[in-house]
Amino acid sequence: MGDSTWFWLAGVLLLQAAQSIEGAGGAVWTYSGNTGPTHWANANNSCGGNSQSPINIQYSPAKRQSYADFAFQGYSTAPSDATMELYNTGHAINVNLGSASKGFSVSGGGLTGTYHTAQFHFHWGSVADLEAGGSEHTLEGKAYPGEVHFVHYSGTHADLGAAVASGSSTALAVLGFFLELDDNDNPGLNPIVNNIGGAAYAGNRSAFSQTFTFDSFLPADRSRFYRYSGSLTTPGCNEIVAWTVFEDTIKISRNQLNTLLRATYFEAEAGHEPEAMANNFRPVLVLNSREVHRSFERSGTWRILPAWQVIGLGVLILAGF
């Protein structure tokens, strides 16, 4: 069987898995209006569960926990037979991994066993105001311009779809990285930025002519992270995810993020033209009785101030205090 056939089969399997992740029972959902996040639970009961994601992460309440180092396979050097493609799901932009996806994996870091990488995808805000936020998780109340999720399934399952269907609370391990604006382009993101036109509309897919390495755009330090049990952030909102959210960010230039935003569109609603893919993030939800753990101690007194404290300090400064 040729490489192209393998890639096609892998694409079909990933599409089926994505559909099982992104929707339950064919229910229509969007990020706004009557089918937006506040209404998801009407069609997907799990979206109203007690262990939903994303959440606001806070350093101080999070409990310090010692973890072994992460071990990443395929992140620095892609497997020789690896294939990758851009895919517009109608809700987000994915980078799907082909038939060699089991050559990409993560273990350690407190995870139970080895998790195979299936895909990663983007959540972001809008070109109207990149600073206004677009990340799903927030850190001390601060939203970032975007967030990248690396989706992995437990090696105890045959594939992503089987992992989701299992209902296990640790079926998936998702690694979340905030996108942070930088003055310079992130060269590691150029393969995605330069090829985004091939995934402009829902259902579009575009194979990369050559693979690229994840380490080329990820933060080098991945020792500082938060861990909690949560859910998929899209319907059906299955509570099957061991979440890892890293403190160090992926840098992206304003030009790169604008290019991604201006080139992509949501799935069109019946009788309407497709709208620009903007603000495709779920707002934060309550933690309830769950605990958040962190892998590190911050040196000194450095911390991110919540927005209300920043505003308060500004008022005091202007008042001459």
Image (tube, rainbow, N blue to C red):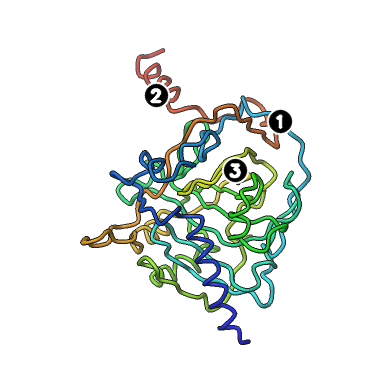
Q: Which quadrant is home to the N terminus?
A: bottom right
Percent from the top left, x then y, of residue 176?
57, 48
Q: Position of residue 287 (x, y in %)?
A: 54, 30
Name which quarter of the figure residue 270 lies in.
bottom left
**Label 1, label 2: how far apart the Cα atoms are:** 29 Å
* Residue behind mark 1: 64
Q: Which numbered tag is attached to residue 245? A: 3
Q: Nearer the viewer, residue 73 or 238?
A: 238
Name the element at disc 1: strand
Residue at point 73%, 50% (across, down)? 70
For the residue carrying disc 2, how many other residues have a C-alpha within 10 Å: few (<14), some (14-19), or many (20+)?
A: few
Q: Which mark is residue 102?
A: none
Say whether residue 218 is left or right of residue 193: right
Circle 3: element type: strand
Residue 2 image-quadrant placement: bottom right
User: Which three-letter amino acid code belongs to the residue tagged 2?
Assistant: Ile
Instruction: Check whether the beta carbons of the residues at disc 3 and disc 2 lie within 8 A of each other.
Output: no
For the point 52% across and 59% down, the residue is 186
Residue with the mark numbered 2? 311
Foreground disc of the pair 1, 2: 1
Question: Which residue occupies 40% across, 16% down?
Answer: 316
- Asked if the residue at tag 3 contacts the one at tag 1, i.e. Cβ–Cβ closer than 8 Å, the answer is no
Q: Amino acid at mark 1?
A: Arg
Q: Is residue 87 left or right of residue 270?
A: right
Residue 158 rendering spot, x and y as whole percentages? 67, 63
Q: Residues within 10 Å of mark 3 (few under 14, many from 20)?
A: many
Q: Is residue 192 above or below residue 182?
A: below
Location of residue 292 by image quarter: top right
Cα–Cα gap, marks 1 and 3: 14 Å
